Image (cartoon, rainbow, N blue to C red):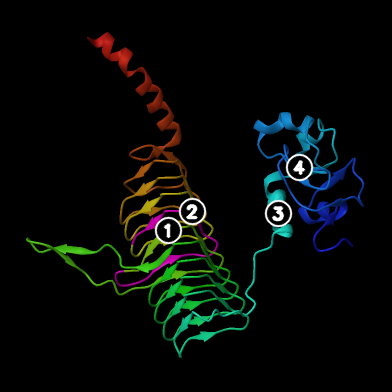
Amino acid sequence: MSSDHELTLAEVARLVGGELVDGDPEASIQGVNTLADAGPCEASFLANPKYRSELATTRAGVILVSQREAEVCTRPVIKVQDPYLAFGLLQRHFHPLPKGRGHVHNTAVLHETAKLGSHVDVGAHVVIGPEVEIGDHSIIGPGVVIGHGVRIGRDCIIHANVVIEDGSQLGDRVILQAGAVIGSDGFGYAWTGREHLKIPQTGRVVLQDDVEVGANTCIDRGALGDTVVEAGVKLDNQIQIGHNVRIGARSIMASQVGISGSTTIGAGCQVGGQVGFAGHIHVAPGVRVAAKSGVASDLGPGTYAGIPAMPHRLWLRVCAIIQRLPELVKQLR
């Protein structure tokens, strides 16, 4: 068995569920790198055909490749079904997520009723409010503010300058990247005829297990009930989630998505960057929405693009017609 900081090629193959070809099973690997930069003691991978030409010049000790690429590669390879997934598994071995060790900085301010589990790290200038509960091995980074009655599960990582407002509930293994705001007031106002009257937002935000929230993303608390992000959801940077939104399990969203209040996103959806959702709509499970689309009404199963969002094949036809518009206008004139 190799050390904690290296793996033999045989161990790599077992870890990623692949088959080693033309390599010494006892040769060791100490990390992962790109095809261009990898050395003999590093693994690499080919997931994008754009980099296929680098197979001929790479010095990597072993390459994670698909069945098709394995047939043309002259270096030791491990054949896998999904090279990018295999890369992720190997990268996580060499760079595991950190766990708290019980260090509490002397500048942190903890309310006397706050309860910390075992081995919780608390960084500099953290403020933890009353009746907060934090699970074992979680990490609270510097400058974090945690409000009244917040619950944080086990093995969570809360990066610097995150704000978690009163009553928010976080499951286990939740990751909040720097600057995220969880539980800010929903954008709720009523017009009196003279001014916009602020409506108190009395709900919560609930983040279930294994949710990750990107840097500077904001998730508003519910107006009455909860805003809910279900298990395994991954949100990129600078996303806005309105009050009483519900995002289904294992959905994933790229940067700058905006979701208006009371919209429901089904499980397993994939949303490109800068997509906007109107309020009070329903998106079916498994829907895919292309970047910069505008979703103004309910979406059934399928792939969508455009403004307003329409079936992707129709959007391609619309784009083709748009490119011909100058010629058609000239003919009409």
Q: Nearer the viewer, residue 215 or 166?
A: 215
Please tell me which of labels 1 and 4 falls first in the chain.
Answer: 4
Q: Within the image, what quadrant is residue 293 found in? A: top left
Q: Name the residue beneath numbered marker 3.
A: 91
Is 62 left or right of 158, judged from the image as shown?
Answer: right
Give the main secondary structure of the magenta stretch.
Answer: loop
Residue ID at (54%, 58%) = 250
Label 4 is placed on what type of residue?
Answer: Ala
Q: Secondary structure at mark 2?
A: loop
Q: Position of residue 309 (x, y in %)?
A: 37, 40
Contact (Cβ within 8 Å) of mark 2 with mark 1: yes
Residue type, label 2: Asp
Q: CA distance from mark 3 to mark 1?
A: 26 Å
Q: Is residue 248 magenta?
A: no
Which residues fall within the magenta stretch?
Answer: 223-242
Question: Outermost residue toward the bottom?
Answer: 112
Task: For the residues labelled 1 and 4, say whether their Cβ atoms are less than 8 Å apart.
Answer: no
**Badge number at residue 236:** 2
Dot 3 amino acid type: Gln
* Image location of residue 283, percent across then percent down: 41, 52
Alpha carbon separation for disc pair 2 and 1 = 8 Å
Q: Nearer the viewer, mark 4 or mark 3?
A: 4
Of circles 2 and 4, which is in front?
4
Label 1 sits on residue: 217
Whether residue 314 can be seen here: yes
Q: Secondary structure at mark 4?
A: loop
Kindly identify which residue carries mark 4: 38
Amino acid under label 1?
Answer: Thr
On the image, the x and y values in percent for residue 133 come to: 50, 82
